[in-house]
Image (cartoon, grey):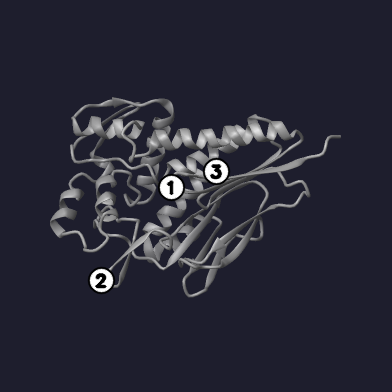
Amino acid sequence: MPSTVELRSDFGAMGCPCTMIVYSSDHHAGQTALAAGRDEVRRLESKFSRYRDDSVLTAINRAGRDGREVALDAETEHLITQAFAAYQKSDHLFDVTTGALSRLWNTASCTLPSDSDIAHCLEGVGMNKLCWQPPVLGFKSKAMEIDLGGLAKEYAVDRVCGLLKDLGVTGGLVDLGGDVRAFGRQHDDLPWRIGIRFPKPDGDAAMTLFVIEGAVATSGLYERFVIIDGRRYGHVVNPITGWPIESRSAYSVYASTCLDAGTIASIALLKGDAGAAWLRELDVPHVEALESGEVNHWRIGSQH
């Protein structure tokens, strides 16, 4: 029986460090699978980036500004459908129409945005302002701008895992900026180890999860933020108030797919102090890590 080799690829994409690990009985086949995985991540990055003039997402937003409807391809339609489901599940807190609002706060490095600038951006926020007759998407306001940053990376993790399996990889792990999915086992037949960090920039591992099959996605404010007048403002914006949410917790959620795990973790973060209780009501396996060093977990460890 041929021996199984471990192969690893570290690269950058989607604005974050990425890692893929595969186990294969053929070294060349394993390297080919890694190359295909990297290509798939970069394909999705170029397709759904709102920072590229040639992306599909930019074309959609351009059509919205021009007052035109656009027929979406099947892949983009899938993400928009997922976005509407999350919008309803979150009581309208998970909202992909916050593109202009997020850009406003991303450029706020020295001074706070004015109330009038925030109010202007809010005129284009709200998925209820989208005209959605799948696969056709339209915009009720020309000020709207879609941002799929809360879905595309997690979707990419799932896509790459499926691709690796199709290419004969017997076990693998895909990590795109901390959104992770694993399948199969390592060569020593041990489960995969996934570390959960405390929600602070220099945080050590708060907990290690042992995963055989499934995904873990984390949502927190500890890596992307600005400090203005001595106060920290995170990158996640409340679509109702127009202001960044405040949370000293980070939520890591386990689910069968990374898209599900990431969406649920993001909603929990958006819910602020009510996030942990909401996750428990859903009976979703998760970890809540606080800056204080406290770690709370629900259905984690007993099954995974």
x, y (%) of residue 302?
Answer: 66, 60
Name the residue at the left extreme: 116
Q: Residue beneath label 3, please?
A: 257
State the separation of the CA atoms marked 3 and 1. Answer: 21 Å
State the separation of the CA atoms marked 2 and 1. Answer: 27 Å
Q: Residue beneath label 2, please?
A: 229
Judge from the rendering whether residue 225 lies leftward or rightward of residue 206; answer left or right: left
Q: Of residues 146 and 15, which is closer to you in this image?
A: 15
Q: Quadrant of the N terminus?
A: top right
- The answer to whether any part of residue 175 appears in the image is no
| Disc 1: CA contacts within 10 A as few (<14), some (14-19) or many (>=20) | few
Q: Is residue 188 above or below residue 78?
A: below
Q: Amino acid at mark 2?
A: Asp
**Secondary structure of residue under mark 3:** loop
**Secondary structure of residue under mark 2:** loop
Q: Is residue 195 above or below residue 5?
A: below
| Disc 2: CA contacts within 10 A as few (<14), some (14-19) or many (>=20) | few
Label located before the other in sequence (3 or 1):
1
